[in-house]
Amino acid sequence: MRELTYAQAGLEAITEEMRKDPRIFYMSTDPAVPLMKEFGDKRVRATPIAEGALTGIAIGAAGSGYRPIMDWRQVTFSFVAMDQIVNQAAKIHYMFGGQRTFPVLYRANVGGGTRLAAQHCQCPYSMFMNLSGLKMFLPSTPADLKGLLKTAIRDNNPVISFESNRLLTTKGPVPDGDYTIPLGVADIKRQGSDVTVVAVAWLVHEALAAAEELAESGISVEVVDPRTLVPLDAAAIRASVRKTGRLVIADEAGPTAGFSAEVAAIVTEDPATFAKLKAPVKRVCALNVPIPYSPVLEDHVFPDRKRIAAGIREAIEGRVSAAAE
Amino acid sequence: MNLSPDKQRAMLRQMLTIRTFEERASSDYHAGKIYGVVHCYIGEEAVAVGVCGALEQGDQIISTHRGHGHCIAKGADLKRMMAELYGRQTGYCKGKGGSMHIADFGIGMLGANGIVAGGISIVTGAGLAAQMDGKGRVAVSFFGDGASNAGPFHECLNIAAAWKLPMVYVCENNMYAAQTAAAETHAMPDVAGRAAGYGIPGIIVDGNDIFAVYQAAARAVARARAGEGPTLIECKTYRWRAHTERIGQPDFRTEAEIAAWKQKDPVARLLAQLKDQGALSDPDWQAMGREVTATIESAVAFAEASPFPAPEQALEDMYAA
């Protein structure tokens, strides 16, 4: 199978869908040059730096029959559009009783590894997961990104595509031709029997590396990649945990009220899954600080394969609880 | 741009309908039949009716938290509006929106909005869609003096001017952002002056003079349809009632100020003009009043006879298919 980078796969999804549907148009500060060349300045709009207005303009155009794509670029910039995301995009379909559809795709890069410090290395997707009314995903491979983007563009609701900064230049196999990946369906990236690691984005690859290393010690790790954050594939996550009896959650975001907390909750609140747990749930997350600039500091704050492996060992071998220490 | 007597009478009827609807909404709110909050538009009717009078069916508008007037002026169904205020299944939003979130996308009314300045971007997107459609449609953003101090106003005026969008931005300057006087919060007394910063026309009109409003809107709409870009119209007006109908809210406005503005009643002004023209007799005016009251009564009857939504319907309409 041919190989594309994560960024190329994203561009290919957008390009293919725009060729098929003239109602799609793209707005971004400094949009990708190949898009501008192919589709011209009316369908690919280089916008003023006004994310708040443009996020709302996308909603209004969607309600008027178009299928806009608004690229925030770094997720950081979405914060200046929070009214339009939280009060408008997430609620407009429900609040008005489902009168119109609002097919908008928002794109945002997330995650660290780029040495861009506190503002531009964030993983705030749980802030958006907490809203009712938005769908969102965070793929770990070029193929998943392409398939999910195509589904999102065809979806009749606002969808956020979170895309990993660390993965933009990484390559992976991408099928030829038109294919889609449904929202809300997890992918088992590695089968195993001793412990389940639920990871997203770059940490899927780190979890796979940890699993490879631990296999030498006879530990069999299953890696579950939810791919979609909302709706989250609770059934697949629970099924894996019922099989292995142990759960480690790896997330580039901090733990507090985060994606990892949500996964822990959906596993432990399900009686059938809870009954199969052999060990406490272990979270391997970023430390609870803004992301610092110096590589030494940044690398200390983000989790990696070593911390995931340590977390897996802890889940397997048990640990002294804080209360008993 | 002379208005026919028929059109003037229709405008008078619409203004009277807005006023009667809200008088009833206010009393039903205080009677506990309407929940949450109601923001009355009474005193500002000439703005919504004058602007919407210059629009065609396919044109789109967006409203504010004070949205009943815009809905009625764009032709919304009074029954479904009242049912929405009553929280009933037959309301425009099936009881999910209430007074602050009435929309009727079918008639180009893109919604009232609880966030000051929150609608300006959305309707600018409708204007972008209208431009891309190329059918000469326009979009109108209604907002207050308070919203003119918020970011979306400035961002959208710049974008609409840069892209020559077929937009009309209508500032309803009623001199107060909730309880706070515009004089305390605006760097310049006139909102229209800000248009200069975006290279577009900024027009000030007497917002209680429906002819002035209509003519300014008609010119702005013609300019937008011709592809010449947006216009900012500032309508100087006044709300007769407090910011909301909630009991006990402070209202720092003086009795004298309120009384002075009631002397400039937009309904009475149009009525007097029609009478001067011999276009409306006293019996005709009385008949109009009875008819309007009857339509409001039947809207209330419809709302009261309508069922509440089933509780489980709270889970419907999350996502479109």
Image: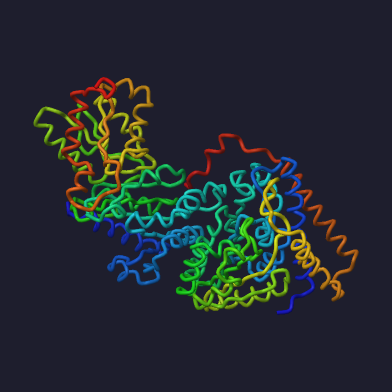
Q: Is residue B320 left or right of residue A154?
A: right
Q: Residue at x 55, y 38 (%)?
A: B314
Quarter of image, res B210: bottom right
Give x and y (percent) for residue B259: 78, 62
State the residue lying farthest toward the right.
B283
Count of marks, rendered view: 0
Give x and y (percent) for residue A211: 16, 35
Give x and y (percent) for residue B74: 66, 62
Examine the rendered structure and indicate whether residue A109 appears above or below residue B218. Answer: above
Q: Is residue B117 left or right of residue A306?
A: right
Examine the rendered structure and indicate whether residue B118 appears above or below residue A205. Answer: below
Examine the rendered structure and indicate whether residue B275 appears above or below residue A253. Answer: below
Quarter of image, res A279: top left
Examine the rendered structure and indicate whether residue B291 appears above or below residue A272. Answer: below
How is the structure coloured here? rainbow
Q: Is residue A256 left or right of residue B291?
A: left
Relative depth, front residue between B118 and A13: B118
Relative depth, front residue between B12 and B171: B171
Q: Is residue B214 left or right of residue A205?
A: right
Q: Residue at x 34, y 35 (%)?
A: A261
Quarter of image, res A275: top left
Give x and y (percent) for residue B246: 68, 47
Q: Quadrant of the N terminus of chain B?
A: bottom right
